[in-house]
Each structure stands twice: as C-alpha cells, then as structure tokens.
Image (cartoon, coloured by chain):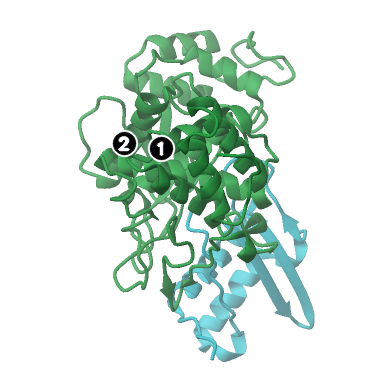
Chain colours: A cyan, B green
C-alpha cells in the first residue's frame, strides 16, 4: 500500500555479541543458500511486500528476491528481524 | 477429482478442489438461506483453493451462488489475531452490532462507504458487479505496516506504532484495496510497469473519491492526499501520496522522501516495486486531479464517471498511460459529446502530465 522502501545493512562484527549471535541463528535457520534466487508469486493480488535479501558469509554471497506470499516459513523470523531493524535505525542523510 | 462427500457438479472434475464433510450442495443451501454467521461459515468452507484462483469461470459460478439483490451489502470482518492465516476468525457480519474493536468497525464502515460510492454513483453492485461478499481481515501480522488485496479479500495490518498507525484508520486506504478487486474483475491491469502503475492509480482515484463522497467535498475542497492519518506522530509527512502534488507527501529520516513523479519527464525506470507501480502512479494520479479541478464540482460526478467507464469497458491488462489517456478522452466524448468542456478537461489533464492526446476539444 505505502510503496515505501525500508533498507538496513547489518554487520555481525559490528553488533553486540548477543545480538550478533541472534542474527547468525536467524540466518542459519533461514538457510538462504539453499533457496532459489527468486521466489515470485503467481497469485492475484496487490500491495504485497517484496523483499531483497543479500547475505555474505564465509566468502560466499547470496542474493534472494521474494514476494511476500512466497516467503518460506524458515525465512520469516529473519525478515521480521530485518524489518524491525530497518524501522528503528535512522537512515543516514546523504551529504 | 472426487470430494470425500461427493463431486462438485458445477466445476470440472480436474479443477474441483472441494473436500469437506458437509456436502457441497448443503453448503450452497446454507450460503443462500442461512443467517449472516451461517452464510459466512458456509462461504468460508466453500472458499476457492489456490488452483481455482484467477479462473473466472469457476469464480463466476461460485459468485453466482451467493449473488445478492442489487444494493444489498454483505460485509464480513475477520480477525487474524496477529497471525498470517486468512481469513481468520469471524468477528462481525452484516447487520451485526458495532464491535468494541475500532479496527473491525473501521473496516466494516469503510467497506460500506466504498460499496455505496460504487453502487449509488456508478451503479455497480460490489466488487464483481454481482453482489460479491466483502471480506476484510484486520489485525493481520505483527506490527504489520501494510494493507493489501489478496485476490479475494482486503487485509489490514495494525502498523508498528512508531511509523504507522493501523491501516483501517484511513477510509481511502480501504477504498484503494477494494478497488484492486474491481480492477481485477474489469481491466485486470497487469501489476507491472505502466499497467501496474495504472492499477495503483485507479485504486488511489477511487479511494480518494470514497473519502470525498463520504465528506461531500468538491474537488476544490478535497486535500487529494492518500493515507492521511496513517503516519504515527513524529513521522515527517502528511500522507502516503499526494495526487495534487506527487512527490511532496513526506520527507522523513527513516521513510525517505516521497519518490513520486508528477510528469512523464520524471518517469522512474526501475526494477523495484514491479517497475515502480507505487512510484509512477503519481503521473496518472495527477492527470485525474487536473481533470477533476478543471471540471469543478464533485470529482465523482464527471471525472469519476469517465475514469470508471474507462476501467470497466476500455482498458486491457497491458494498457499503458497513453492508452488510458486516449480512452478517457474517448469516453468523455461518448458520455458528454465531442469537443465539450468535459473532453477538453480530460485532454488538458493528461497534457499537464506530459501525455498529449490528438484531436480537438
């Protein structure tokens, strides 16, 4: 509905230890490297969310695009965490 | 395919998804004759499966079973209880007393206001023109900053409280989502690039008209803002979008700046948002505003009529902005005569956003 974009970039090395471990558990549970690069929905509808997630881990990089109705259950906790983080961390204004 | 309780005569064997203890013929009788709660339960049980979604023959058969007399609303409001299963628990049916839950009442009233605009102004009996039941789910998800149409119903989140309020708070949001349903049954504009931006724009247009009709505002009196009241305190912005001045609705540290263009020279080419359907909708939105202002009076009377007939009769799934411009000018001629002020206003409305339609008037 809103058509707005929320963006967040998180570096586990820059997070407090507890939060970093929590994020790593979410990433592990999401098993992003096992999913295809695109999870699109063929169903009708409008105003659903779309997600683009990129993870860099152990020298590997994976980027996935997901339609809201196609998000695997294992990925939902990670997306919720990232969405909450995007809402609360101030966006840097460009100079 | 044979259901546990029997086959479905109306739908081909290959497509029949219905498996239930209560036989379908009994469910259909309940859907026709039961009270509001019984009808809602029967309909829920008969709800189409993923296989049947989008198959209009099957949809029209099911819809025909529950079609209502013209002018009769059938609203059912569900509560998802912060989960993601739809439709959720039935909490209010048509004619039921008001709930203590304001989101429930807002969804109910907003669906009614949208139905009334379409029926009283445009002569349309619900989303499918056959009196389709209006299903809405509130309290979807957790801190869910969104509302959407899923192909069968409207769905509303509560917002996170820091950026967004609950999405039922703005009546134009409700009109917007219901209009996605109307579009699906009419032009079925593909949700991508220009046809997708038109899809979004028609939803903003009729969402705005629901608000203006409810308030009995003229085009001049209206604020032409979509989603005013949605932002939580502290967010720097008036609304989600401005039809009058695309790109000016908000500028916030977290949400960024309103990216909408108001002219074809600023058209945004992007792969995001299905080709910018929520971004480039600013262009046809402003074309409608410019048309309505030039015509004066209430925007739903002439501009709304022209846009409605265009959506219903003229546009196709892959229609472009230029197609919409040409057809609205043609419909203005059909409805009000060639060269009259109505056709002139539509032509000028599109010219204001950089799309010229040849011809006089």
Residue A72: percent from the left, percent from the top? 64, 54
Q: Is residue B161 above or below residue B355?
A: below
On what subunit does the disc labeled 2 rest? B
Q: Is residue B172 above or below residue B229?
A: above
At a point 39% along the width and 12% down the height, the residue shown is B69
- Tell me the quarter of the image containing the C terminus of chain B: top right
Label 2: which secondary element: helix
Q: Seen in the image, is B197 located left or right of residue B238? A: right
B151 vs B357, nearest the viewer: B357
At a point 37% along the width and 69% down the height, the residue shown is B237
Q: Quadrant of residue B226?
A: bottom left
Label 1: which secondary element: strand
| Dots 1 and 2 on the same chain | yes
Q: Are marks 1 and 2 in contact (CB under 8 Å)?
A: yes
Residue labelled with disc 1: B136
B209 vs A80, nearest the viewer: B209
Residue B181: percent from the left, percent from the top? 52, 35
On what subunit does the disc labeled 1 rest? B
B343 vs A45, nearest the viewer: B343
At a point 52% along the width and 59% down the height, the residue shown is A3
Q: Is residue B47 above or below residue B296?
A: above
* Label 2: few (<14), some (14–19) or many (≥20) C-alpha neighbours in 10 Å: many
* Label 1: few (<14), some (14–19) or many (≥20) C-alpha neighbours in 10 Å: many
Res B80 seen here: no
- Residue B301: assigned label: none
- Residue B108: assigned label: 2
Residue B185: percent from the left, percent from the top? 57, 29
Q: For marks 1 and 2, give the CA distance.
A: 8 Å
Residue A70: percent from the left, percent from the top? 65, 50
Q: Answer with mark 1 or mark 2, whichever residue precedes in sequence.
A: 2
Res A93 seen here: yes
At a point 40% along the width and 37% down the height, the residue shown is B136
């Amino acid at each position: 509905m809103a058509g707005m974009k929320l963006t967040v970039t998180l570096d586990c090395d820059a997070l407090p230890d507890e939060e970093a471990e929590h994020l790593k558990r979410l990433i592990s549970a999401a098993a992003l490297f096992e999913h295809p690069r695109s999870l699109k929905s063929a169903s009708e509808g409008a105003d659903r969310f779309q997600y683009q997630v990129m993870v860099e881990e152990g020298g590997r990089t994976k980027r996935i695009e997901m339609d809201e109705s196609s998000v695997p259950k294992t990925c939902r906790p990670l997306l919720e965490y990232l969405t909450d983080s995007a809402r609360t961390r101030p966006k840097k204004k460009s100079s | 395919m044979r259901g546990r309780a029997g086959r479905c005569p109306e739908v081909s064997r290959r497509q029949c998804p219905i498996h239930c203890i209560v036989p379908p013929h009994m469910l259909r009788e309940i859907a026709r004759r039961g009270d509001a709660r019984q009808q809602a339960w029967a309909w829920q049980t008969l709800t189409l499966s993923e296989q049947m979604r989008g198959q209009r023959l099957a949809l029209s058969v099911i819809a025909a079973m529950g079609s209502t007399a013209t002018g009769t609303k059938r609203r059912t409001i569900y509560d998802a209880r912060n989960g993601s299963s739809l439709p959720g628990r039935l909490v209010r049916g048509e004619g039921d007393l008001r709930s203590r839950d304001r989101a429930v009442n807002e969804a109910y009233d907003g669906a009614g206001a949208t139905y009334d605009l379409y029926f009283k102004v445009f002569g349309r009996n619900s989303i499918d023109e056959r009196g389709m039941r209006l299903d809405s789910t509130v309290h979807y998800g957790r801190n869910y900053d969104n509302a959407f149409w899923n192909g069968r119903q409207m769905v509303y989140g509560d917002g996170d409280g820091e950026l967004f309020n609950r999405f039922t708070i703005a009546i134009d949001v409700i009109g917007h989502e219901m209009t996605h349903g109307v579009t699906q049954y009419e032009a079925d504009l593909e949700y991508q690039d220009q046809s997708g931006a038109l899809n979004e724009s028609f939803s903003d247009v009729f969402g705005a008209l629901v608000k203006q009709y409810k308030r009995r505002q003229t085009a001049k009196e209206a604020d032409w803002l979509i989603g005013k009241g949605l932002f939580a305190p502290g967010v720097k912005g008036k609304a989600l979008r401005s039809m009058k001045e695309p790109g000016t609705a908000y500028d916030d540290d977290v949400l960024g700046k309103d990216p909408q263009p108001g002219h074809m020279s600023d058209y945004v080419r992007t792969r995001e948002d299905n080709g910018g359907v929520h971004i480039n909708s600013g262009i046809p939105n402003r074309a409608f505003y410019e048309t309505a202002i030039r015509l004066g009076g209430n925007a739903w009377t002439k501009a709304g009529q022209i846009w409605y007939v265009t959506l219903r009769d003229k546009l196709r799934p892959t229609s472009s902005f230029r197609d919409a411009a040409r057809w609205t000018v043609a419909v203005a001629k059909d409805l009000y005569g060639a060269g009259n002020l109505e056709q002139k206003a539509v032509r000028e409305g599109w010219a204001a956003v950089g799309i010229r339609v040849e011809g006089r008037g």
